[in-house]
Image (cartoon, grey):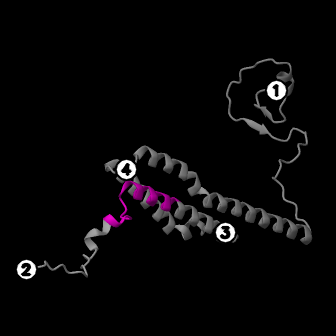
Amino acid sequence: FGSSVGLRHPAFSPSEHSARRVMVAPAMKKWEFNLDCGAKLPSALGSTMHMGDSDGSSVAMKNKKDNIKALQEKKAWEVALGPIKQVGMQLFMLWMSGSSPGIFSVMIMSMLISSSVSQLGQLTTAFEKFDQVETVLQKLVFALTLVAALAFVLYHASNMGLVPTQTGDWVSYMEPKHMAEHVVPMSAH
């Protein structure tokens, strides 16, 4: 069949197999696999290990550590930019909820606020698996993105009238002003 692996049964001889004569074996007891057919095949890539000198192995270890460090830094930036990918979906949800307060818009607002706050609470756990790289800048980008999203959601809630930002919202807490003037009617003489 053109392969380097020989497969034969004891009932068949090589001359019979090469002449392509088929002979039914009376009792097929065992098959024999001959993996060494005289052809010298090269070893598969990565199947053998060569012990290098101490200089070569230290360079290889340094390259491996550099590669792991670069990969962890790339993954840390992916985590840091994760909230930015959610901003488009959040803006679309806010636009679909409308500008008037209703049950769905309040539910969407509360979901967006709670997701931003919970992600801010998980800031340290999101970056703890990146122990070989410094993640201060990534954490800062992650936190600033979430704070900006939270500020925009609160601004939208303020425009809908859900956040008390106007003076009319605080009228019940204002003390009435006492007039300094006192009007006395003049008597007619």
SS of the residue at dot 1?
loop
- Of the two numbered discs 1 and 4 in the rendering, the one whose residue sits closer to the viewer: 4
Of residue 141 and residue 170, the one placed in the foreground of this image is 170
Q: Residues within 10 Å of mark 3 (few under 14, many from 20)?
A: few
Which mark, by number, is residue 149?
none
| Residue under pointer 4 | 105
- Of the residues under marks 2 and 4, which one precedes in the sequence? 4
Q: Tag 1: residue type?
A: Phe
Q: Main secondary structure of the magenta part?
A: helix
CA–CA distance in space, label 4 to label 3: 34 Å
Of residue 154 and residue 65, the one placed in the foreground of this image is 154
Magenta stretch in the rendered image: 149-168
SS of the residue at dot 2?
loop
Quadrant in the rendering for residue 34: top right
Mark 2 in CB contact with mark 3 (< 8 angstroms):
no
- Of the two numbered discs 2 and 3 in the rendering, the one whose residue sits closer to the viewer: 2
Q: Is residue 60 visible?
A: yes
Which mark, by number, is residue 137?
3
CA–CA distance in space, label 1 to label 4: 71 Å
Q: Position of residue 33 (x, y in %)?
A: 77, 38
Of residue 80 and residue 148, the one placed in the foreground of this image is 148
Q: Tag 3: residue type?
A: Leu
- Of the residues under marks 1 and 3, which one precedes in the sequence? 1
- Of the two numbered discs 4 and 3 in the rendering, the one whose residue sits closer to the viewer: 4
| Residue under pointer 1 | 1
Q: Residues within 10 Å of mark 4 (few under 14, many from 20)?
A: many
Q: Tag 4: residue type?
A: Ser
